[in-house]
Image: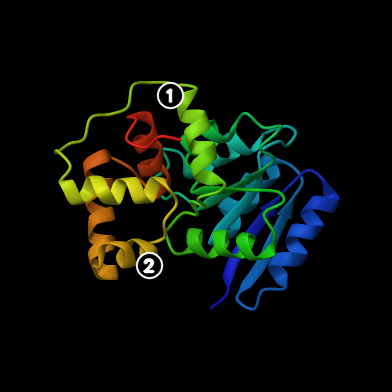
Amino acid sequence: MSIRVIVADDQEIARTGLVMILDAQPDIEVVGEAADGRRAVELARRLRPDVCLFDIRMPGLDGIEATRFLAGPNVADPLAVVVITTFDLDDYVYAALRAGARGFLLKNAGAAMLSQAIHAAANGDALIAPSVTARLLGAFANAGPTSPPAHPIETLTDREEQILATVARGRTNNEIADEFHISLSTVKSHIASLMAKLGARNRVEIAMWAYETNRVKN
């Protein structure tokens, strides 16, 4: 079964390149393209793709607002959104994650990382690349959240604190399992518990909480 993707980028060359890379993957199918956020939201609501890949900077409705419409806290049936941006120019990544984005990439990430991000989002996970996402999360968290970080519903166990730190540093579930010599299902159980205790919708929000509460240093 192919992963159905919508791509939105106002630069035609960039959009065409992304579509070509994704369509070249054996199990990914681009089912829609948009040159602005408003059109992207319309397409996403109509086609209900597995993953939306949005540029942050778009005319009319930018990637942040488009993400909020499709994956925000008040959306009953949120879609998976991955945002793509340029680190040196965009100051909006933190806001995009707050709006519900499941992960993000730099535009020079390459085909392999792009495919990995799409697969992660489609599987209900989020791409937290150690050299990219963790650094950016740390930078934006240090700039200060819009509101104080929420207190956990229950106190985190020692193991959950350890898992929290590895998630924030960009470790995959398999890497966490190997590091702590535990099963993959146990890792998933710990992450599910963290999400429940922190009120997080995905591991991106788990990582953001870790940085906001200074549990992980850059």
At x 45%, y 21%, the residue is 144
Q: Position of residue 53 (x, y in %)?
A: 63, 52
Give the number of the mark in front: 2 or 1. 2
- The answer to whether residue 179 is visible is yes
* Residue in the foreground of this view, choosing between 207 and 79: 207
At x 67%, y 40%, the residue is 37
In 3D space, how far apart are the residues under numbered discs 2 and 1 (Cα atoms)?
Answer: 30 Å
* Residue in the foreground of this view, choosing between 30 and 118: 118
In this rendering, is residue 59 above or below 42? above
Q: Amino acid at mark 1?
A: Pro
Q: Position of residue 177 (x, y in %)?
A: 31, 66
Q: Residues within 10 Å of mark 1 (few under 14, many from 20)?
A: some
In this rendering, is residue 156 above or below 180? above
Residue that lies at the very extreme toward the right in this rendered image = 13
Task: Name the secondary structure under disc 2.
Answer: helix
Q: Is residue 153 left or right of residue 55?
A: left
Q: Position of residue 102 (x, y in %)?
A: 48, 48
Q: Quadrant of residue 96?
A: top right
Label disc, if present, on residue 123 of the rendered structure: none
Q: Amino acid at mark 2?
A: Asn
Q: Residues within 10 Å of mark 2 (few under 14, many from 20)?
A: some
Earlier-in-chain disc, 2 versus 1: 1
At x 74%, y 62%, the residue is 19
In this rendering, is residue 62 above or below 33? above
- The answer to whether residue 68 is visible is no
Q: Position of residue 62 (x, y in %)?
A: 66, 34
Task: Name the secondary structure under disc 1.
Answer: loop
Residue under numbered circle 1: 145
Label disc, if present, on residue 174 of the rendered structure: 2
